[in-house]
Image (spheres, helix red, strand yellow):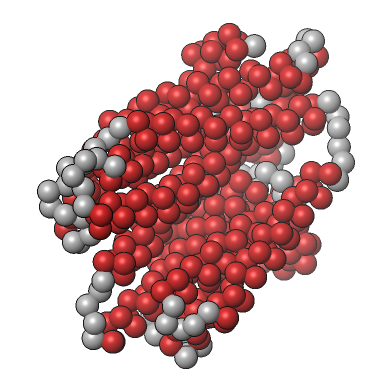
């Protein structure tokens, strides 16, 4: 099966492009920041510079590892689900579930290794640029030379491969069960328990903010981590929540959107499980970006109002927050675009059937547009709720206010990025898919 996996990657490289892109960017970011460990461990580096680089590399490495797994998992889940007929055919020809699993895991490992190898060059340049930025901000001494060694290479290759193999195992396990006709509530029950656990942990982290002294330097950590966990919990539970929301909105959607609104509501309810790969990055991006940026804004204003210069620790914390948000933006957009592109382009047969049944290309695009709008609205509302849940406690404890002084500009920018990524990718991919004649689209194997 490993030989078959190698032939599959070589013969159909386009299928693995989204996973390759996720692995490449993930490994590049991980190796870039892990190179700070190599630089900090080099001889002659002073203690302050070493501590600044080590803290930054550790924090961003933890966030990056989680986001790399989510990014690769989202693309692999869509890819494996689209290969349901292939998995079913392999099972019918005598392949065991273990053999199918080894084939998909082998494919994913090969793609991850290629992506990590391609990321080495950009990571070396990124590490040099990062050390230069730390020097410009005064966090690292001018005589420190950037290094790129075993720590960077090991972490980049290791995380990319482990994330790919783990995500592939989970995705193909569900696919083989579906091919065998196994159905049941166990998967939904596990998802519900995981989502509720994340919500409980996030709520606990946010409430802990009220028990911490207002002058404590680590105060930012509790609401920030709480908002992150709430975002993850909402993301895990979002597909089931979306089904209930659409049940209530089916009538208004049909009245406002006509046939397109009615079909979009039915399609979204039927494809709730598939939509988790789209809703998850959107909710996580919105919640984490909103909470982190506003919390950092409140902290920066407090330091400025005190008339004191920012210490090295203040600069480290601000740099970390901004870098983490940057990573979130990049990976969330990649996850959104990859998942939406793969899911929409795969619906060419469905679009062809709708056109043969009498729907015009405009009506099909209208249906896709309504689906994207509903997904965007759901993701933004849940993500904003998670972000606000972290912002308000921090603002109350740190400044004795309920809401921060920062205006809605940051939030509107976050909303605009998520909306453009979702609507642009969905409608652009659907328009491109509709270029094929309806009969040709229907005759192509799904």
Q: Position of residue 94 (x, y in %)?
A: 79, 10
Above/below status of 270 relative to 310? above
Identify which residue is drawn at 54% across, 57% down. 284
Asked if one can make out residue 232 in the rendered structure from this viewpoint, the answer is yes
Identify which residue is drawn at 21% across, 41% down. 43
Residue 70 found in image quarter: top right
Q: Position of residue 106 (x, y in %)?
A: 58, 19
Asked if one can make out residue 382 in the rendered structure from this viewpoint, the answer is no
Above/below status of 33 relative to 27? below
The answer to whether 365 appears left or right of 310 in the picture is: right
Q: Position of residue 137 (x, y in %)?
A: 20, 61
Q: Check the picture and name the quadrant holding the C terminus.
A: top right
Nearer-the-camera pick, 19 or 67 = 67
Identify which residue is drawn at 41% across, 50% down. 58
Nearer-the-camera pick, 315 or 102 = 315
Identify which residue is drawn at 12% across, 52% down. 142
Q: Position of residue 165 (x, y in %)?
A: 58, 29
Nearer-the-camera pick, 217 or 228 = 217
Nearer-the-camera pick, 427 or 27 = 27
């Amino acid at each position: 099966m490993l030989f078959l996996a190698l032939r599959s990657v070589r013969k159909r490289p386009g299928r693995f492009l989204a996973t390759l892109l996720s692995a490449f960017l993930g490994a590049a970011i991980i190796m870039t920041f892990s190179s700070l460990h190599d630089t900090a461990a080099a001889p002659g580096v002073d203690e302050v510079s070493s501590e600044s680089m080590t803290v930054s590399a550790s924090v961003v490495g933890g966030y990056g590892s989680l986001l790399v797994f989510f990014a690769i998992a989202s693309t692999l889940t869509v890819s494996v689900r689209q290969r349901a007929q292939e998995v079913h055919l392999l099972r019918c020809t005598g392949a065991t579930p273990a053999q199918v699993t080894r084939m998909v895991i082998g494919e994913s490992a090969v793609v991850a290794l290629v992506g990590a190898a391609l990321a080495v060059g950009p990571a070396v340049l990124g590490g040099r640029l990062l050390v230069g930025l730390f020097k410009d901000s005064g966090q690292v001494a001018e005589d420190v030379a950037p290094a790129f060694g075993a720590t960077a290479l090991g972490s980049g290759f290791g995380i990319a491969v482990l994330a790919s193999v783990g995500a592939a195992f989970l995705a193909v396990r569900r696919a083989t069960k579906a091919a065998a006709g196994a159905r049941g509530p166990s998967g939904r029950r596990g998802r519900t328990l995981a989502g509720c656990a994340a919500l409980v942990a996030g709520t606990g982290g946010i409430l802990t903010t009220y028990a911490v002294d207002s002058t404590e330097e680590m105060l930012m950590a509790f609401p920030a981590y709480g908002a992150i966990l709430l975002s993850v919990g909402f993301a895990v539970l979002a597909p089931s929540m979306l089904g209930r929301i659409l049940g209530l909105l089916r009538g208004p959607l049909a009245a406002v959107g006509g046939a397109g609104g009615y079909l979009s509501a039915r399609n979204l309810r039927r494809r709730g499980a598939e939509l988790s790969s789209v809703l998850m990055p959107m909710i996580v991006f919105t919640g984490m970006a909103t909470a982190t940026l506003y919390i950092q804004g409140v902290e920066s204003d407090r330091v400025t109002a005190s008339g004191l210069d920012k210490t090295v620790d203040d600069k480290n914390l601000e740099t970390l927050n901004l870098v983490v948000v940057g990573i979130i933006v990049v990976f969330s957009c990649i996850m959104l675009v990859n998942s939406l592109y793969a899911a929409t382009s795969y619906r060419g047969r469905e679009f062809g059937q709708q056109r043969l049944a009498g729907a015009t290309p405009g009506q099909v695009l209208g249906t896709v547009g309504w689906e994207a709008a509903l997904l965007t609205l759901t993701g933004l509302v849940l993500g904003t709720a998670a972000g606000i849940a972290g912002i308000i406690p921090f603002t109350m404890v740190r400044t004795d206010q309920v809401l921060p002084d920062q205006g809605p500009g940051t939030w509107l920018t976050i909303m605009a990025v998520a909306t453009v990524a979702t609507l642009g990718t969905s409608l652009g991919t659907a328009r491109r898919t509709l270029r094929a004649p309806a009969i040709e689209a229907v005759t192509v194997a799904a």
